[in-house]
Amino acid sequence: MANAIRALSMDAVQKANSGHPGMPMGMADVATVLFSKYLAFDPRRPDWPDRDRFVLSAGHGSMLLYSLLYLTGYADMTIDELKSFRQFGSRTAGHPEYGHAAGVETTTGPLGQGLGNAVGMALAERILNARFGDTVVDHFTYVIAGDGCLMEGISHEAASLAGHLKLGKLVVLFDDNSISIDGSVDLTCSDNQMARFAAHGWHVLDCDGHDHKAVADAIEAARNEPRPSLIACKTIIGYGAPNKQGTAATHGAPLGDEEIQAAREKLGWPSAPFEVPDDVLDAWRLVGARGASRSAAWDVRLAEIDQDRHETFKRIMSGRLPDGWEAGIEAHIAKLLQDKPNVATRKASQMAIEALQPALPEMVGGSADLTGSNLTRTGTMTAVTPGDFAGSYIYYGVREHGMAAAMNGMALHGGVIPYGGTFLVFSDYCRPSIRLSALMGQRVIYVMTHDSIGLGEDGPTHQPVEHLAALRAIPNVRVFRPADAVETAECWRLALSHDSGPSVLALSRQGTPQVRAEAKDLSARGGYILKEAAGEAKVTLIATGTEVALALAARKQLQADNIPTAVVSMPCREIFDAQDEDYRNQTLRPGTVRIAVEAASPFGWERYVGENGGFVGMTGFGASAPAEQLYEHFGITPAAIAEAAKGRLG
């Protein structure tokens, strides 16, 4: 059975003339033991909620996973798909991609991301277990990770968090083959990985990765351990290739026809390429078929819980929001229009969360050690703590990258809508995970506060300048920068209702006046005319965030000088870009002088203001001083905005 994985992997890589045969061949025994003896899954029902999650963090070895999916009987993973490995339009991409094939739980490729995702999956499992009990939620998360995954910095953040929270249903199978692309791992790394994970609070053990009984004994021990487990499986990369096994030559290149033939002889595998003997395939299909009885038994257990909890579980696992969920945020907006608070948008965000939470118990918040600054926790939220997962708030510690990767895993697991906070400048530390949120189309909400030089005295190291432009450059990411409390509430509603990609809420430290007086959901089109010109418009000011109030003040000056001026608030450029051309033109008015205002880099604003337009914002880094002085120093003032418009009127 293990040799079937080896043969299919080396055949597919050879046919594609591209790929990584070494890891699948080395870990074939471990994977065979895991799938045949322990993994709870049902190929006929890939989305069974209580299945074990299997994550191939070492995603370059994707043929290991594709071979397993074919062998165990996933309907969409045919032998023709294996023959199309790494070809355009195939389900068998060069690295596993979520959504391309059933049974692929997450997109892996950037090393260590899968491990971080798995921590989130294991965390979501425990949170849902605390809410629904063992009869409905009780499964493991298994990971195959390599030396590269454990070298990447994210592995330290992920392992530390998992160890602290005592995620005992997380089992990492470490492909301890001592080989990386450059050669022997000892060229670059002398870490004692077992000692490191033990220091993180993990249960650690090792085994011969080619001894089936030793592997089974290790997994058995891990399954009965209250701590997360790392099993160092000592393997030979490219196992079975007589001249190349144990070397970097098997890592990232086809073995070649001669070596494959020699491997077939050594392994006693006489079958032609892509052929699996009937008895071997039958044995694998029997492994896959066993899952049907497990998932059917789970259906019976689910049906026995009370109807309300049953329906809630089905709803949250489907990702569907409850009927009437918007009532709380609508009432909140109505109160804001009445009270007109002058608050920072980070505070407005906290107020919105308070309004949303009662209707959305699946919201699970957190912060990377900035709870009091991000304002991501409300008074009714209790914390998730080691061994107690009944809460809805996670203290992630100073682990921005690990937090973001874990949130992806939580979203992928289902049943949870994760949001987490840090400063916008530290989105740099989250960016790889944000990119994968976008690539996988996951509803993950990033609450990024202290969004400009307006954070003040912490200085240029903490003042984001290029970050809005950088995040807007990632496809399928919605970047929201609301102007006041009303827009903040609207942006939260938009983020939650968007289930096919991540949202970034860029929020201010400093207070800002309420600029909205209408209850209509104006943010829903991404940009809108907030204040019409008095007379036929000659100038259009386009602003985001706290700078909208400055644009309104500049409009007042321009109107006093008989220059009719409109102000456009643009809380989300991505949504605005998706509007029809007529609406965009009606809003931006290409015939007017257009000035964009944002306390950030001008990059990207040129397409909104046109060749004759202008920009008022930042052209370099900030400085350490109170916010008001910084805005004055860098020329982001109503007077500067008005002068920029006048200078282009001719």
Image (cartoon, helix red, strand yellow):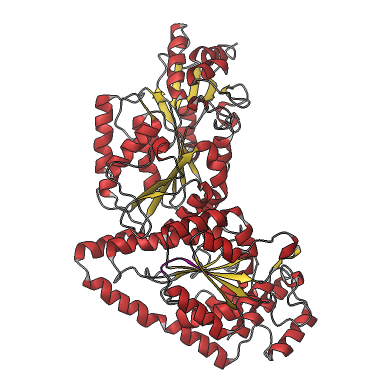
Q: Which residues are magenta?
A: 226-230
The quadrant the C terminus occupies is top right
Residue 96 in the image: above or below residue 624: below
Between 499 and 415, the residue placed more toward the observer is 415
Q: What predominant SS class does the magenta segment belong to?
A: loop
From this viewpoint, which residue is outermost toward the top?
561
Q: In the rendered view, does 102 fall on the left or right side of 346?
A: right
Residue sitting nearer the eye, 21 or 550:
21
**Farthest-out residue, bottom:** 279
Left or right of 630? Residue 140 is left
Asked if residue 127 lies left or right of residue 576, the reply is left
Q: Quadrant of residue 197?
A: bottom right
Task: Examine the rendered structure and indicate whether residue 61 appears above or below residue 153.
Answer: below
Q: Position of residue 198 (x, y in %)?
A: 53, 63
Indicate the position of residue 301 as horizontal and vertical percent values. Answer: 27, 74
From the top left corner, tell me how far across and down residue 353 is, in percent. 32, 41
* Quadrant for the N terminus in the image: bottom right
605 vs 636, nearest the viewer = 636
Number of labelled discs? 0
Q: Is residue 525 above or below residue 186?
A: above
* Residue at image location 45% in from the left, 13% down from the top: 564
Residue 436 on the magenta span: no
Residue 107 can be seen, yes or no: no
Residue 468 in the image: x percent, y percent? 54, 36
- Using the rendered image of the protein, determine whether residue 277 is visible from the camera's viewpoint: yes
Please check the rendered image and state whether residue 229 is part of the magenta-colored stretch, yes or no: yes
- Give the quadrant of residue 486: top left
Q: Residue at x 33, y 56 (%)?
A: 320
Residue placed at 55% from the left, 82% from the top?
214
